[in-house]
Amino acid sequence: MKVGIDTNVLFYFLNKDSPFHEDARKNLISLIEKQSAVITQQNIIELTVVLTRRGVSIEMTKEYLQNFIEVMPVLKPTADTIKIFFEQLNKKSVKGVKLFDLYLASTLLSNGVNMLYTYNKKDFIGIENLRIWEPT
Amino acid sequence: MRTVVKSIRVKEEIWEALYRLSKEENKSLTQLLNEALEKYLAEKIRKRAIEKMQKLPKLSLGNKPLTREEIYEGRY
C-alpha cells in the first residue's frame, strides 16, 4: 500500500531539534524500504519554502530535495485532482490556508493513494476517503 | 541487439526454472536475464540512495512545529 508523506514528516526527518525527529526518521526509512512512501510536487515546493525560510541555503535545500526524489516517487496532479478538490470542497467548509491541505489530499487521492502520514492530523480530518496515520 | 554464444555452468535446477519461466512467459532467456538485471541494478541504486539519505547532515532548525500557516502565510 502506498502512503503519502506530508511535508512536516520530511522536515522533521531533517531537523534534529524536533521532538518528532527520531520518530520521523524511523518511520520514513521503513516506508521507503518497503517502497510504500510517495510524495507530491506540492511537498517539494513546501519543503523548499520552509527550509530556505529557516535559513538553509538554496544549494543545500536542493541537495536534500534531490535525495528525497531519488528514493520516493513524486506524484503529479492528474486530470481528476481538481475534480476531487471541488467535490471535497462542496462537502467540507474549507477556506484560506486549509485549501492547500485539501489540494494535497486531492493529488494523493487522484493518484490512488488514500493514506497520509502526517504530524498534523487535524488538518486533514473530514476529507473523504483519506486515511490519516499520525504516530503517537 | 547483438547476441553471442557463450558456454556457462549453472546449477541444473536454476537452468530448469529459467527454461520453464521462458516457456510460461513466452520470453527469451536474454529478455528474462535483461529484466532480472535491470531490477537488480535498480534495487542496488535505490539502496545506495537510501544509505545516502540516512547520511545526509542533520539540520538544527529549532523545535517549533511546522504548520501550513508557516509555509503559506506572510510570504512577502
Image: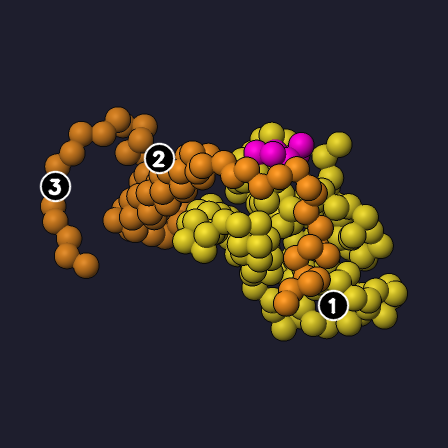
Chain colours: A yellow, B orange
**Residue at point 82% right, 51% down?**
A125
**Residue at point 57% right, 49% down?**
A54
Residue B6 has which mark?
3
Magenta span: chief secondary structure: loop
Residue B57 screen position, x and y as percent:
45, 37
- Name the residue type under label 1: Ile
For discs 2 and 1, the disc positioned in front in the rendered view:
1
- Name the residue type under label 3: Lys
| Residues at marks 2 and 1 touching, judged by CB atoms closer than 8 Å | no
Q: Disc 1 marks which residue? A: A84
**Residue at point 33% right, 43% down?**
B41
- Based on the displayed image, in which of its 4 quarters is residue A13 positioned? top right
Q: Residues within 10 Å of mark 2 (few under 14, many from 20)?
A: few
Q: Disc 2 marks which residue? A: B17
What range is drawn magenta here?
A: A16-21
Kindly identify which chain the residue marked by label 3 belongs to: B
SS assignment at label 1: helix
Q: Nearer the viewer, residue B23 or B42?
A: B42
Kindly identify which chain the residue marked by label 2 belongs to: B
